[in-house]
Amino acid sequence: MRNEGFHAEKLINKGEEDLSLRIDEDHRAVSINVTGDSGVSDLIKPGDFVDIIVYLDEKKDGDKIIRPELSKIILQNIRLLAIDKELKREEGVTNEEIPARFLVTLSVSIKELEKIVLAENTGILKLALRPLGSVTIDETKGTTSEELIVELGESIKDSSNEKGNNSMETFTTYRIKKGDNLRKISQEFYKDPMKYLLIKKANNIKDENLIVTGEIIKIPEDN
């Protein structure tokens, strides 16, 4: 009717499925590509909350490592608005087959928007589904491949000690540099080049002359 003006309730009812109505005022909707393995096997649904992890591979300048291989949680408690074009999914209804690739649309703040766009174009993103009602934010520093190797080694050692086996070696990690060989590394760590056999055995190296620059190896303690 002419001169009637607009009524908010009519606009909302008419467009209640519009995505823009689901976004908080200080947030934006952004879509990212995920796969079956990175998107919680397509078990997530609109309305869920997720954490987002980025994986960055190692970056080198010649033999110099500029950035180590890294995994880091970059965003937490992010609301999932839609999957592909679905704004809702019926309870109990799941896809029979996990799609190879699909889009998820997330509600993020302006600062988070910049971070997620950069992360998607720099590394690989993975989603982690949060428990229902969880709002806890945990600060993490990320994990590098070197730290993971050390941690796994310590876990094996602790497990072995619990079983009464004290023969498990402890070790540090070392990244092979250009020009390295096992005898040279042995000299550096043990002050004895002939102890290279310890390193060879610990890393199951068949040919001492075939070691790869940039590879991380274990240096066992000299007991």
Image (cartoon, rainbow, N blue to C red):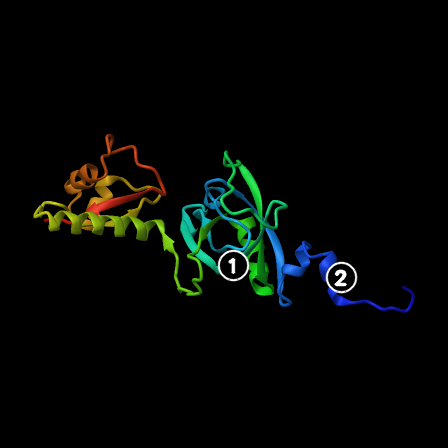
Q: Hey, what amino acid is under mark 2?
A: Leu
In the displayed structure, 11 sits above or below 87; it is below
Q: In which quarter of the image is the N terminus?
A: bottom right
Identified at 50% across, 54% down, the residue is 48
Residue at the far right: name it.
2
Q: Is residue 59 visible?
A: yes
- Residue nearer the viewer, 190 or 116: 116
Q: How many marks?
A: 2
Considering only vertical position in the picture, is 47 above or below 99? below
- Disc ID at residue 25: none
Q: Residue visible at 44% across and 62% down?
A: 133
Amino acid under disc 1? Ile
Mark 2 highlights which residue?
11
Q: Where is residue 83 in the image (x, y as percent from the top left)?
A: 58, 47
Res 191 seen here:
no
Indicate which label's residue lies in the foreground, 2 or 1. 2
Q: In which quarter of the image is residue 197?
A: top left
**Circle 2: element type:** helix
Compared across the picture, whether 50 is left or right of 212 comes to right
Cβ atoms under marks 2 and 1 closer than 8 Å: no
From the image, tell me which residue sits under label 1.
Answer: 78
Residue 142, above or below 91: below
Q: How far apart are marks 2 and 1 (CA)?
A: 27 Å
Q: Residues within 10 Å of mark 1 (few under 14, many from 20)?
A: many
Q: Where is residue 3 in the image (x, y as percent from the top left)?
A: 90, 69
Residue in the foreground of this view, choosing between 131 and 38: 131
Looking at the image, tell me whether mark 2 or mark 1 is earlier in sequence order. Answer: 2
